[in-house]
Image (cartoon, helix red, strand yellow):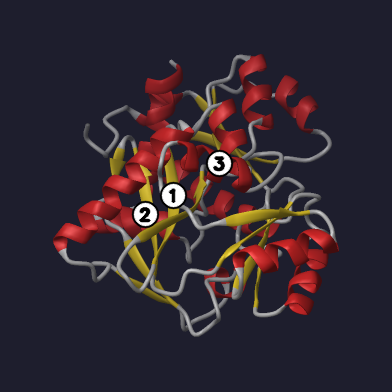
Amino acid sequence: MSLASTVDPRAFGRVAVLFGGRSAEREVSLKSGAAVLDALLAAGVDAFGIDVGDDFLQRLNAERIDRAFIVLHGRGGEDGSMQGLLECAGIPYTGSGILASALAMDKLRTKQVWQSLGLPTPRHAALASQDDCRAAAAELGFPLIVKPAHEGSSIGMAKVNDLDALVAAWQDASRYDAQVLVEQWVQGPEYTIAVLRGEVLPPIGLGTPHSFYDYDAKYLASDTQYRIPCGLDARKEEELKSLTARACEAVGTQGWARVDVMQDQQGAFWLLEVNTVPGMTDHSLVPMAARAAGLDFQQLVLAILADSVEARG
């Protein structure tokens, strides 16, 4: 399959770019949505933006919408709920369907699916109390990383080295999500790999002076390092790309996605999570990977939109 779109931009009809929303990732989504909308308009697509809020159903009924480009990060846009609403309204949309979106948004359930298929992911536990923290510390050891189970952009995440820090990190993560995940820390390089229209794009190696690739490193810092080529030899890069494809197939992603992977000091890869509506800001990783595959930002956006035609008519 060719990555670039061959669809006449006028054939998409009237396209609503959905961004903003009310999740903890709202600010990132606003930037992503503005970039996507600008690219569609520059390409000649009849596009307009909707900052998804309390009046969204009224907008949905009032506007003529032939197709939706979802750039809502986090809950309310990336978790299957928006996908379900659009399907009920009969509006084709970009990206993964209801089930894959809901599954990928739940880090714990995603890991359980991967484990059931024999795919490597770090050992982990769910936290709901201080007793859970003590049990996880005894079973998993330190260091550990704590994550809200249903957030993205590294929001609410923390690396911890002792029980007191673990309890504090669990309490902080609980402000974002009732379900909190803790997993073993994998010491080694981190990679992120984008998938577009069924093809795995060149992996990106990540480097940061922060303790991990946190929100600041993703969106604000000027010292984050992005390596394309990623630095792996050809055999290991193919292994990483194959693992990414299997991870996405297990979840059932469509259109586009991005998988985050760690490599330990013995060279083994470990799946962390899959994002079904990745960032599209000037710091974002999918546009970087697309450029390495020969697509500029406008071509990337059109390819994502074109996939919605093939997937949903």
Identify which residue, 255 or 7, lies in the foreground.
255
Q: Nearer the viewer's eye, disc 1 or disc 3?
A: 3
- Number of other residues with Cα within 10 Å of mark 2, as a class: few under 14, some 14 to 19, many 20 or more: many
Mark 3 highlights which residue? 112
Q: Is residue 160 above or below residue 110?
A: below
Residue at screen point 77% across, 48% down: 22
Mark 3 residue type: Gln
Q: Which disc number belongs to residue 194? A: none
Q: Give yes or no for contact between labels 2 and 1 (Cβ–Cβ under 8 Å).
A: yes
Q: Secondary structure at mark 1?
A: strand
Decide if residue 31 is on the left or right side of residue 251: right
What crowding class fits label 1: few (fewer than 14 Cα within 10 Å), some (14-19), or many (20 or more)?
many
Establish if 297 lies above or below 133: above
The outermost residue toward the front is 138
Mark 1, residue position = 258
Q: Position of residue 284 (x, y in %)?
A: 47, 61
If you read the primary sequence from the N terminus, does the residue marked by circle 2 or circle 1 appear first? 2
Residue shown at the point (84%, 37%) measured from the top left: 54
Quadrant where the N terminus sits is top left
What whole-number distance in Å separates the C-alpha atoms at marks 2 and 1? 5 Å
